[in-house]
Image (tube, helix red, strand yellow):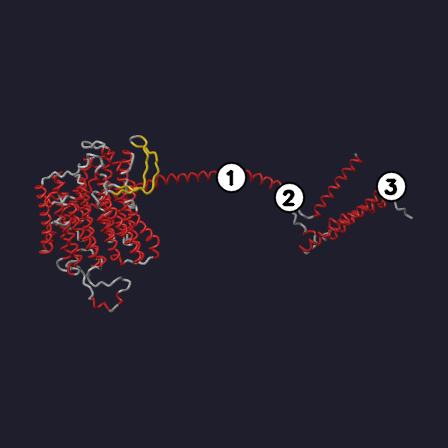
Amino acid sequence: MLEITPAHYTILSAALFSIGVIGVLVRRNIIIVFMAIELMLNAVNINLVAYAQQLQNLIGQVFVVFVIAVAAAEAAVGLGILLAFYRNKETVNIDEMNVMRW
Amino acid sequence: MDLIWLIPLLPGLGAAVNGLLGIRYFSKPVAAGIACAAMGGSLLLSLFAFAQLLGAEHREHIVTIANWIPPIPLETVSGVGQFEVPWAFRLDPLSGMMILIVTGIGFLIHLYSSSYMDHEPRGGYVRFFTYLNLFCFFMLMLVLGSSFLVMFVGWEGVGLCSYLLIGFWYHKKSAADAGKKAFIVNRIGDFGFVLGVFLVFFTFGTLDFREVAEAAAHMPVEAGGFGVISLICLLLFVGATGKSAQIPLYVWLPDAMEGPTPVSALIHAATMVTAGVYMVARNAVLFEHAPNVMFIVAVVGAVTALVAATIGLVQTDIKKVLAYSTVSQLGYMFLATGVGAFSAAAFHLMTHAFFKALLFLGSGSVIHAMNDEQDMQKMGNMRRYMPVTFITMFVGSIAIAGIPPFSGFFSKDEILAYTFQENKVLWGLAVITAGMTAFYMFRLIFMTFFGEYRGPSWEKADDSHGDHGHDDNHGHAWHGPHESPRLMTTPLWVLAVGAIVAGFVGIPAAIGDFIGVGNAIHHFLEPSFTAGLAGHGDEHAGLHLSHAVEWALMAFSVLVAACGIGLAYVNYVRRPERAAQWKTNWAGAHRVLTNKYYVDELYDATAVKGTMASGRGLWTFDKGVVDGAVNGAGWLTRAAAWVSHVLDKYIVDGLVNLVGWIFAEGSYVFRRGQTGLIQNYAVATLFGVFVFVTVYVVARYVG
């Protein structure tokens, strides 16, 4: 049976992160973009947990809990902004979100 | 006598009440009643005051009611003096006589006016009485004032009232113009008067008549030269020529006939125009010290008398004849003052007030009867229609012509006698004037009251009696000449009696010695003409002619007057065609006279046109230079502002805008990156991260 090494975790994390980055860069639906950001955060979380296990250091796990809490707060605030935006523009297309432009 | 300040005040109050309330609220009878009551009260007070004055030992009484101008230090010849004027009234024989004339004749004329002005609308009627009362207020102030300045208040006030009353029918252009003319011509005279008053203060340090007279009495008589007293007297006399219509300022008086006839009677015959004579007589002591000016006064008076009389010969307007007659008689008065006969001047002033007021009121009665017709050529045979007016005017004419024993005879002969003593040439002029006076007055009487009726025809009384439609807005239907109502004839009667008996107070010595009566008015007035110093008392009693000469003079002047009357009778009653013949034979002279020697035209061409030309010149100067300077300054400011504007716009603003422009353009590159698209920013971020990571990896593991 294949032993799961930190290298596996790192590759998984890198793959997830890449999917997230690509999602953020190419998707036009802002909700999808949000979800891609969550992917990136969770890729980081996998990395942190994996290395906490590897180095037997709890700081990494504590940090993950922090990241999850911040991600939840970020999701709440982000969705609130999103709703307000939708009421004004009746769209969630990210290309329309350019009113702050020069 | 302490109440003499009430004498001017009563008419003043009447004017105030009528003026402030009456024009709005009072009916005609109420307003006339107030005005007449004020004058009546004033007349009663004057009579009491005069009676007390007659009984008093010292015939001078000064009543100070208030301090007017507190002491002000002012420069005079003898150092710094105190300029102080109290509201003081002075009752002495001269002012006593004047207040009787003003209030007496004023009262009669108020009565007369209440009927004469009845055709006026209510507002105008009340306004008329307001002015009339106001006039009496100022006139009494003038005669009672104890100093030059109080007199000057009255002097200007009567000028104002004269203006207001001449222009009473102000919607008529000729009346408004005549009022302006009177006012402006009087201003010229007043200018002289004011200068004279300044000089009086500068010389004597006081304006009180008594103090000035006493100071002047101590100064030498300026017989040979022309000193400061002469200058004062000359300036005062300029004022007198304006107010009393003497050459060269007489032109306003004939035009003043545009006013209502009672005004002409009161202001322009009996009272205001004699103010100049009164003022000269009031300053008798001053004038006595300036013999050269006295001579000028006498000459001006005599020439005025003659010139005005010649113009009066050919006038056809009944009031114009009387106006020139007034100018002429005023000339007589100045002639009298000029030869030193101040009491004779005052005496003639009084008798003239009676008969001239009478004549004016009579002419007013005729004008009234003729439905406002003033041209004597359209009258005739009026004695049939208005016997009372005829009789009283006839009396007045005899009085002015100088037939004994009517009043004009006494006063005129006294003047003639004094003039004969002083200067034979002036006497000759005066006698010729007397003859002309008799002629034109009886020409007036004959043209108006005798001969054929030449006026317009009228509706028969029966035709319009039942028909009230005629009494519409166009006024009363005219039923032909008619005698005036009793309110108008009563004053005529009173004045006629006055014109007969007024002369008896001044019976000349030649007759007086004969019947044992002295010259009462002469002795009565004498104290007013002296400085009140011992030894000066008899200075003026100087008629040194023998009784024979006096008798001869009297006989001669009566003869001249009779000739004048006879000539008028022949030319205008017996053979009226001869008057027309004269007109054609002497066409040139007639034209000159009817045009009043072209004096108005001369003044128009010189003074009026000159003033207007200088005004226009000043206007041009104002427009060209003053306005030019102002406009130039404005233009310069605008030009400077434009330069500043250009600098501001292109240099200051330009710099500021340049800075802004530089940043705006410089930011172009950066601006392009700000797309507002989050994903663009994310790409940039990712790219940055790659760069950093690449640099780290290369630095760590390769280098």
Left or right: where does residue B521 sit relative to residue B617? left
Q: Which mark is residue B582?
A: none
Task: For marks 3 and 1, give the one nearer the viewer.
Answer: 3
Please provide percent x and percent y for residue B485: 22, 60
Q: Quadrant of residue B374?
A: bottom left
Residue located beneath label 1 in the image: B650
Q: Spatial distance from mark 2 to mark 1, Cα to Cα?
A: 28 Å
Q: Quadrant of residue B482?
A: bottom left
Q: Residues within 10 Å of mark 1 (few under 14, many from 20)?
A: few
Q: Secondary structure at mark 1?
A: helix
The chain letter under disc 1 is B
Task: For marks 2 and 3, give the one nearer the viewer.
Answer: 3
Residue located beneath label 2 in the image: B671
The chain letter under disc 2 is B
Q: Which sits in the foreground, B699 or B547? A: B547
- Residue B128, placed above or below residue B84: below
Q: Residues within 10 Å of mark 2 (few under 14, many from 20)?
A: few
The tag earlier along the polypeptide, 2 or 1, is 1
Q: Which sits in the foreground, B332 or B453? A: B332
Same subunit: marks 2 and 3 = no
Residue located beneath label 3 in the image: A55
Q: Amino acid at mark 3?
A: Leu
Please provide percent x and percent y for residue B346: 19, 44
- Residue B435, placed above or below residue B490: above
Q: Amino acid at mark 1?
A: Tyr
Outermost residue toward the right?
A1
